[in-house]
Image (spheres, rainbow, N blue to C red):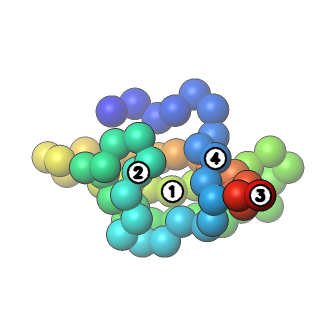
């Protein structure tokens, strides 16, 4: 799996163990919060065969 081109839009901050929203076989193993103007942080997801993918994310709560 390749990282998304755009940051993931999540309803809340991710936690370790959360599933990837587009690939449920991947689980979050590390969450890094950042002080950036365009993203809120990065999540490291681990998948099958020890594969990992790093995704940027932004949080937009549901209305």
Which of labels 2 and 3 is toward the front? Answer: 3
User: Residue at image x 52%, y 32%?
Assistant: 4
From the top left corner, tell me how far across and down residue 39 is, in percent. Answer: 73, 49
- Say if residue 15 shows up in the picture: yes
Which of labels 1 and 4 is toward the front? Answer: 4
- Between disc 2 and disc 3, whose residue precedes? 2
Of the 4 image quadrants, the one containing the N terminus is top left
Taking depth in this image into account, of 44 and 23 the one nearest to the observer is: 23
Of the 4 image quadrants, the one containing the C terminus is bottom right
Tell me the distance, in whole angstroms, between the alpha carbons under discs 2 and 1. 9 Å
Taking depth in this image into account, of 24 and 34 the one nearest to the observer is: 24
From the top left corner, tell me how far across and down residue 35 is, in percent. Answer: 79, 61
Q: What element carries label 2?
A: loop
Taking depth in this image into account, of 33 and 61 the one nearest to the observer is: 61
Tell which residue pokes out farthest to the front in this image: 63
Which residue lies under the disc numbered 2? 20
Tell me the distance, in whole angstroms, between the alpha carbons under discs 2 and 3. 22 Å
Which residue lies under the disc numbered 4? 9
User: Mark 2: few, some, or many residues within 10 Å (few <14, many ≥20)?
Assistant: many
Q: Is the Cβ of the residue at disc 4 closer than 8 Å to that at disc 2? A: no
Which of labels 3 and 1 is toward the front? Answer: 3
Q: In this view, does 2 lie to the left or right of 10?
A: left
- Say if residue 40 shows up in the picture: no
Q: Is residue 62 left or right of residue 13?
A: right
Which residue lies under the disc numbered 1? 43
Q: Is residue 20 above or below residue 18?
A: above
Tell me the distance, in whole angstroms, between the alpha carbons under discs 1 and 4. 12 Å
Q: Residue 63 carries which label?
A: 3
Tell me the distance, in whole angstroms, between the alpha carbons under discs 3 and 1. 24 Å
Which of labels 2 and 1 is toward the front? Answer: 2
User: Residue at image x 57%, y 28%?
Assistant: 5
Q: Is the Cβ of the residue at disc 4 closer than 8 Å to that at disc 3? A: no
């Amino acid at each position: 799996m390749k990282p998304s081109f755009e940051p993931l839009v999540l309803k809340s901050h991710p936690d370790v163990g959360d599933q990837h929203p587009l690939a449920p076989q991947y689980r979050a193993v590390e969450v890094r919060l950042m002080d950036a103007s365009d993203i809120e942080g990065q999540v490291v997801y681990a998948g099958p065969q020890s594969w990992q993918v790093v995704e940027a994310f932004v949080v937009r709560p549901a209305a």
